[in-house]
């Protein structure tokens, strides 16, 4: 079975500072994607960033970047210049292309950005 | 905004009743996946439909069933509701059996009393 683990239930950061959220996963598959989704209080699950496992280069989207360590099965999210609007639940998720194409989510990290 | 809509936004049912939840499809997204998110947890995969046929199922009992229509919109039906069915139900659209990014709707909050 595929598993995704987020070891930080809650984190806080001051506005304009940088924060890193951790995620580890377990799989024997070689063909997969990894995602970070953001879920604000409005409940909508919003895609933050995506990484294809075959790509060595870490994905970047504006203030959001990942540190993908394939051998260690680690996929952390770095948020730079944190903004109040970044306050939300963040979920790490995996999609294994030979295992039904379902997303497997971690338990989430609640991030609070403080002014 | 992902362009995916769900209805209703929230509803309240009692144990033993049946419920139908609906999900629209963005143009061209031929795959829909449904997830259940209990309070304080990550979403759990229920099932996926591709071109009107079930394409995978998670660890949910048969009283959870679904449909996908020719326009790729979808329904989730739950029979014989139990208290533990209280959750946020999310649908996600994607291409090609979900083997790519999945875009979520805003969810339906179901409360079972």
Image (cartoon, coloured by chain):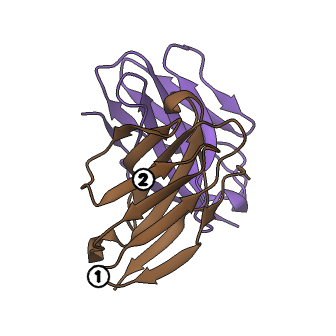
Chain colours: A purple, B brown
Q: What subunit carries mark 2?
A: B
Chain at tag 1: B
Quarter of the image where the N terminus of chain A is located: top left
- Tell me which residue sits at (63%, 33%) in the image: A65
| Disc 2 crowd, CA 10 A, few/some/many (<14, 14-19, 20+) | many
* Mark sitting on residue B66: 2
Do residues under tags 2 and 1 come within 8 Å of each other at their CB atoms?
A: no
Q: Secondary structure at mark 1?
A: loop
Of the image marks 2 and 1, the number of the one nearer the N terminus: 1
The part of the image, by quadrant, that contains residue A55 is top right
SS for callout 2: strand
- Rendering coords of residue B105 (x, y %): 61, 55
In the image, which is nearer the foreground, mark 2 or mark 1? Answer: 2
Image check: A115 left or right of B113?
Answer: right
Nearest the camera: A44 or B31?
A: B31
Q: Tell whether A78 sits left or right of B112.
A: right
- The residue beneath circle 1 is B15
């Amino acid at each position: 079975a595929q598993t995704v683990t987020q070891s930080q239930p809650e984190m806080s950061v001051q506005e304009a500072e940088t924060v890193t959220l951790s995620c580890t996963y377990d799989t024997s598959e070689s063909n997969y994607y990894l995602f970070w989704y953001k879920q604000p209080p409005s409940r909508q699950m919003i895609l933050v960033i995506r990484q294809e496992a075959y790509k060595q280069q870490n994905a970047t989207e504006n203030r959001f970047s990942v540190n993908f360590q394939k051998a260690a099965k680690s996929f952390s999210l770095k948020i730079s210049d944190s903004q109040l609007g970044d306050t939300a639940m963040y979920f790490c998720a995996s999609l294994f292309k030979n295992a039904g194409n379902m997303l497997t989510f971690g338990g989430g990290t609640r991030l609070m950005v403080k002014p | 905004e992902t362009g995916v809509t769900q209805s209703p936004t929230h509803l309240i049912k009692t144990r033993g009743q049946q419920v139908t939840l609906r999900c629209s499809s963005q143009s061209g997204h031929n795959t829909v996946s449904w997830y259940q998110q209990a309070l304080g947890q990550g979403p759990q995969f229920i099932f996926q439909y591709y071109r009107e046929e079930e394409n995978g199922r998670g660890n949910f009992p048969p009283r959870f069933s679904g449909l996908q229509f020719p326009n790729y919109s979808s329904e989730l039906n739950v029979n014989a509701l139990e208290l533990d069915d209280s959750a946020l139900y999310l649908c996600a659209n994607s291409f090609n059996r979900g083997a790519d990014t999945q875009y979520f709707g805003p969810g339906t909050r179901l409360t079972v009393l």
